[in-house]
Amino acid sequence: VTNLAARSALLIQGEDLTIRQRVAHSALAAEGSMMTVEEFHAWFARHRRRVPSAVHRIDFDELVGWSFQPGTGNLAHDSGRFFSIEGVRAQVAEGPIREWTQPIINQPEIGILGILLKEFDGVLHCLMQAKMEPGNINVWQLSPTVQATKSNYTRVHGGSPVPYLDYFRAADPGQVVADVLQSEQGSWFYRKRNRNIVVETTQDVEVLEGFCWLSIGQLHRLLAIDDLINMDSRTVLSCLPFSGLGFAPSGPIDQAGPERFATAVVRSVSENGGSLHSAVQVLSWITEVRARTEVRTVGLDLAAVVGWTRHQDRISHTSGAFFDVMAVRVEAGGREVAGWTQPMIEPFGTGLIAFIVQRIGGVVHVLVNARVEPGYLDVIELAPTVQCTPENYRQLPAQAEPPFLAQVLRAPDADIRFDAMLSEEGGRMFRASNRYLIVETPGDQQLQVPDDFRWVTLHQLVALIRHSHYVNVQARSLTLCLHSLIGGWAP
Amino acid sequence: VTNLAARSALLIQGEDLTIRQRVAHSALAAEGSMMTVEEFHAWFARHRRRVPSAVHRIDFDELVGWSFQPGTGNLAHDSGRFFSIEGVRAQVAEGPIREWTQPIINQPEIGILGILLKEFDGVLHCLMQAKMEPGNINVWQLSPTVQATKSNYTRVHGGSPVPYLDYFRAADPGQVVADVLQSEQGSWFYRKRNRNIVVETTQDVEVLEGFCWLSIGQLHRLLAIDDLINMDSRTVLSCLPFSGLGFAPSGPIDQAGPERFATAVVRSVSENGGSLHSAVQVLSWITEVRARTEVRTVGLDLAAVVGWTRHQDRISHTSGAFFDVMAVRVEAGGREVAGWTQPMIEPFGTGLIAFIVQRIGGVVHVLVNARVEPGYLDVIELAPTVQCTPENYRQLPAQAEPPFLAQVLRAPDADIRFDAMLSEEGGRMFRASNRYLIVETPGDQQLQVPDDFRWVTLHQLVALIRHSHYVNVQARSLTLCLHSLIGGWAP
């Protein structure tokens, strides 16, 4: 077990660790008590082989229980539950494109994404699930203990009960570690939110087929593997109350090089880490951007969406860009129901989702962007420095490029702190995998920061993630990726 | 100057007071440096006499620049700016009435409510404005430094510039004390929000006609006077970073009686004051209520609203209850434009807006209610224990009564800690004045607390008010009223 020295340094701080310190302690546990990372890989591969599944593209008229509604043209389930594909009109006051309509997923029900925590050998472990989702690259990925829409867990489709659900729906308030409604992709979902909840239990927990206990440090290591830790796991883990170690790590300030980067990450997540802007200044900036940005979004019938064409098997933008609405048939084992059909969104191209970070006073700062997406409930959310599909810009003049895209693409290997392909929601998105990058800019390099960007610390991001409407799902994933680098810290 | 001992106790804590301590210091300043409360009353009366104004009810067809739009029936300004009277349909999953439509004010622009702070003789003072609003009881009330819609301050109607606006629009980030978008009445406004901002200046400020400097302690005293401190002042003042004194006040815990109540209020606003529920538990409760509460609201054309009748001079509910939409002509001096006409909302009856509070472990706790209103952006906001118009319930059976209404109405005088008539927004509401009450329940009296109610401390309310979507405008007013009682504290 690595990081023993780091964990000891934490433990000698006192016997009564706070939940924040216990989270840090688990984050430093590169191996857990229940299985090693190597054993996990063997278990996951075995599980995946044993539960075969297949996903096929189908025509819309092969959908069972789903149809285009008369009049509205919305693609909806006959029960009126689950979700539907509708339209949205967005109007913004600035930018090259001021008004557009598009298809969008309407899923007003609030689902539960829950991770159960339990201490083994003094280390918090997360109960994780090998889960099949039709849109997943590799079909199987690692998901939270519970990942269920309201239609799922109230069993609208008559499936089997959702395991472990009662740990979250009937949680003892004293055992709740985090609990917050968070948005998902505002370009694909109209105001969708899920309840991200983490609950600790001290009861005995039966480990069902397909579930396993991993330390946060193990999950951090697995995050570096392409398309393994699914989006729902990432967003729930990002809601944990990270707060550093409860003491200031030693080590020289502003020393360059990746080996001391972990120390600067620890400082960044600590309450007493110095931030460039105060908490009030960050909130005031968000308020100012929201007050000045004029965005109107109105739900539309899918039939009223302009510039999109419905084919036999897809609804596409006339330019061929952005995404398609399509449909799949799933033959699955190990899920609530044995097989089903459903519509999905298939985005084009591989997205680039990147934080530019910089050590300022020895503390890692992240450059976030206040971003408008039509599905957000409150105008803007904080997004990564870069969040786009680069190939969309290849044919366009350089000034159309998003800020900082070129800098991220041209970053030398020595400045790359994290680099992995991670999948978006496999229950609604068909093979949406993006490159998640964290790029460090040398501390002496002054960046021009436009007014819709700000440098914030990890501690400030963690504080904002306690509340809804602040940090978008891509930035929450990257916050987790950045935090995972404290695994490299040694006292 | 009273409270000198209290202020001295604060000052000896250190020379470098934080902004939170400086706010507390000003809150304890029962008199300010620029005028006494007595001088203020004389100044306000003089001002009111010198600037005559009159408000007349008119028929809708006497409105100038406003008309019912063809097709939609919406009552809107010909410029398309300011605000409009439209409709809303609300659907809830529970309760006696599950679906209704009603007229509602649509004001998508975000206005500025700003208070400028400046230190005189070491005490923060607020620049306040004697302002005429057509709906105000007494016509004139005391408003923030700036109270301006976007149409106002971008001068759509060609009025004069808004004084002091640049202190807020071009504020140095280091001088911003509070800055947050806050909702207004969700029964009357569809998703309206204003930017509540407090900025400190160290520059010389010219005091224009109609403006004056008052300490926070003076404003707290004036709050006890009926219909004087307007709603916009109250909501901005509630956003100040109150946090007690920075040290624990002495005095026995749980001693009954109003004379020690102020000590229990000081403890309640302090960071280290013990709370019944942790911050995570309060957030988790809010998340749980939002996830479980199914509310759908859809904007409608006013013409599509059912159960409301348009007369020559008003739009009324067929039952005669709730409110009317009506119109006024204003003849005014001292405002941006000399005279104008506009539609307004005239509510019926006098509302009761009450906090039940209790000393728990010597710390004042407030019983808040997670309340659905059709205009809220995020399902529920925390509301007072009681927020209703009691006369609406006189004809109904007892079980239709809102929880705790009878208890508040029957409270003995000895348990009443605050009692004043305070006006709602006089720019949109015609003579809407409500009774604001704070009633203490003896600590040994166990209250049955339904699941949509929780006991929270002032410190927890203040922390939530830093963010949007948490505390409704009535509860923010009452938070300020409760906080004003620390003026009675003596070390």
Image (cartoon, coloured by chain):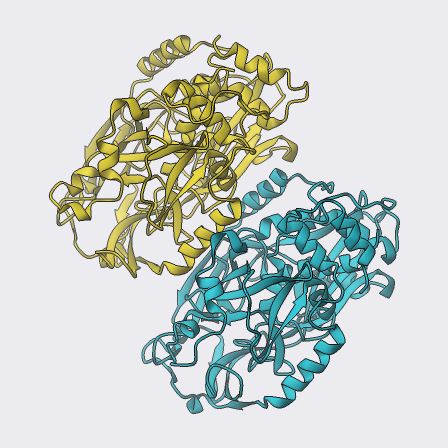
Chain colours: A yellow, B cyan
What is the x, y in percent for residue B344? 51, 79
Rendering quarter of residue A387: top left
Compared across the picture, whether B480 is left or right of A75 comes to: right
Can residue B211 be seen at all in this image of the molecule? yes
Residue at 72% x, 79% y: name it.
B41
- Which residue is the extreme one toward the left? A395
Q: Position of residue A485 (x, y in %)?
A: 42, 22
Percent position of residue B379, x then y = 51, 53
Left or right: residue B398 versus residue A113 is: right
**Quarter of the picture holding the N terminus of chain B:** bottom right
Could you tell me residue A112's position as x and y percent?
47, 36
When asked about the image quadrant of residue B387, the answer is: bottom right
The answer to whether B52 is drawn above or below residue B225 in the figure is: below
The vertical placement of A142 against B158, above or below, is: above
Answer above or below: position of A308 versus A10: below
Number of numbered discs: 0
Image point (53%, 27%), residue name: A244
Task: In this rendered view, identify the residue nearer to me: A225 or A139.
Answer: A225
Whether residue A134 is visible: no
In this view of the protein, which residue sits in the foreground, A263 or A402? A263
Q: Nearer the viewer, residue A211 or A27?
A: A27
Residue B438 picture quarter: bottom right
Of residues A22 and B240, the one nearer the viewer is B240
